[in-house]
Image (cartoon, rainbow, N blue to C red):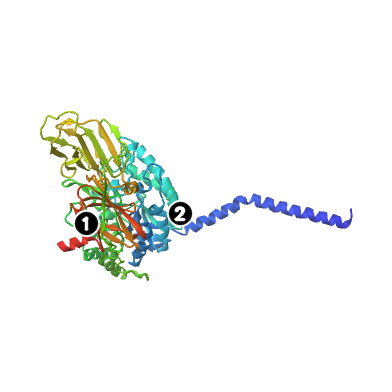
Amino acid sequence: MSPSKVRVNLTRVFVFILILTLGIILYQNRGKTLSASLTFSRSAIKSRTFTIDFTNDTFLMDGKPFKFVSGEFHYFRTPRPRWRDILRKIRAAGLNAVSTYVEWSSHEATPGGYNFGGDNDVEHFMTLAAKEGLYVLLRPGPFICGERDFGGLPPWLFKMKEDIRLRQNDPTYQHYIVKWYQELFTRLQKFMYGNGGPIIMVQIENEFGMHDQCDPQHAMWLRDLIKSYIYDTAVLYSIDPPHRRFQKCVIDGVYPSVDFGPFQNVTRGFKAQRLVAPHGPLLNAEFYTGWLTHWGERTMQFVPPEEVIKSLVQMLDMGANVNIYMFFGGTNFGFKNGANFDKKKGYLPTITSYDYDSPLDESGDPTDKYFAIQDVMKGYVTLPNIPVARSTMKKVFDTVFLTPTVSVFDAQLKPSPVMANSPLTFEQLGQNYGFVLYETVVTETPYCETCRLEVDNIKDRAQVFINEEFAGSIYRANSTDLVFNVTVNQTLSLFVENMGRINHDKIYDQKGILPMVLLDNEELLGWKMYKFPLDDVSSIELLQPTGNEKYPMFFTGVLINSKPMDTYLDMRNWTKGVVFVNGNNLGRYWSDMGPQYSLFLPSEFLKVGTNRITIFELERAPPNYAVKFSPQSLNKILYDDEE
């Protein structure tokens, strides 16, 4: 072998040994390299911390004292395209955080049928909040109250176990919470402050101490479940009214806050917090700017701006953290309004509007209260340079004349019935919202000339018909019986409306007829039940008018539009029902009851050209079947007129 060939071979051997040696070194140090990478990642996360300094009674952000003034805004109460504008207005007022519930029933309308798109895109909401310079107070329930149907719980829980114990240590209830939180927090983990996101606080349950059977063990179970997802990347907190009796379910590891409004004593409110949190930041986690309104109340609720400002200034001067509830209320679109129960007044369903007399009104326009808060905030912080217009343009469209189309008694509209010997509840029928038509034939002549129909547990309101002729109404709030004439072989029909499940305390509020109907003290059997959930009215809009004008009745019409703009539907000449525009459920009206007389129609529900309007009127339409429009809410106008 020549010397040159020997040198080449030695070079190849040397290179091979070098590569082999480097490979061995890298292999032996692979764990150290990965460890160093993880250490770097952890230290990057560890540099972002949100904690509590109990010595100095303050929150700490990245080790520095921090205070927030937040505005409550529920993303599910307005169309997604409006989120950014509202968040921007919250920031423009000088606030540095936004608080929102997450409504389980909106995201999981059917078991396992998760929806995080469109108006349910909570991830997009978090992204927008961060872009607008707002931190987030996350309120994931699972019970949220919020004047929402069933307090935000999905009604199908009633079908999962006959005697399910809600908001307690019930294995079935907790099983479905585990599945729900797996979906939710897997999506929201990345938005926790410690992970680089805007969420600084996460609430456990909601006003749990007000629950008659609040169970600290269940609260601890929820704490540990949420902690398994967020670790120490955000602060856990609870909210209860400032009364000792409501603070019985405060637990370790969850910072207790209070909620109270402008007519309550601020010093006394925080004194109640100090009973359960002797040290730590003062926090009014729901400072009320207004209040909710029920059907049948004299006027919309109103809280003077000067009262709100007076309490807000007092809290800020004390160094307190404040979440303003509501800052923007919005609308209970669809059938998602809840109800309350009063020992004296009984069942009190909430109206469609959730204006709440907020700083931003139902359409998102700033009010005098907004600018008063903004003026206060500039004395404590530097306001961002974000212009805010006094109002957005509203449109008064031409009057639309509708056509009577089809009655619920028409065969072409009636779905196939569910048959049972005794009436079934909405939940047993697998229907969450809307209406159910219950029918039976009177097979024996009652021993009475004028018979008394009794439905002691009607949920919530029923129109009663004999052979499709209206005989009267029964309503759980005032009367559950009715007197009328009936003979053998006549058909008795009860058209039952779910007007909203109770959203606080007495939440075991299943809908429909529970459990029987009595006629002259005899139980009626052999029922047919027709379901009208009205979650899709597109097929109704295509039906030809039948000429059979019997209520409840659908009316259809067309609005021709050249430019989508916000407006209000004037419902004063209609009686009681629901309005749909291009399939979007604007919510209920009940003009005979008040105090809501108009429905907000956001521009996002309209399109250029033909827009379909469908009104489902239960009792009485105006003679010309006309629907008019208004440039502003009639609810507040009528209130101002009375004043």
Q: State the residue lying farthest toward the right.
A: 2
Residue 511 placement, left or right of 118: left
Element carrying mark 1: loop
Rendered residue at 40%/57% (across/down): 125
Q: Position of residue 9 (x, y in %)?
A: 82, 54
Element carrying mark 2: helix
Quadrant in which the C terminus is drawn? bottom left
Res. 88 visible in picture: yes
Q: Nearer the viewer, residue 451 or 623?
A: 623
In this figure, which residue is indicated by the disc labeled 2?
A: 190
Q: State the residue lying farthest toward the left.
A: 449
In this figure, which residue is indicated by the disc labeled 1?
A: 597
Rendered residue at 24%/36% (across/down): 439
Question: Disc 2 or disc 1, which is closer to the eye?
Answer: 1
Q: Position of residue 418 (x, y in %)?
A: 30, 35
Q: Nearer the viewer, residue 174 or 515?
A: 515
* Residue type marked 1: Tyr
Crowding near the residue tagged with mark 1, few <14, some 14–19, many ≥20 C-alpha atoms within 10 Å: many
Q: Position of residue 52 (x, y in %)?
A: 37, 57
Q: Nearer the viewer, residue 322 or 632?
A: 632
Res. 55 visible in picture: no
Choose top left, top right, bottom left or bottom right for residue 324: bottom left
* Residue type marked 2: Lys
Choose top left, top right, bottom left or bottom right for residue 436: top left
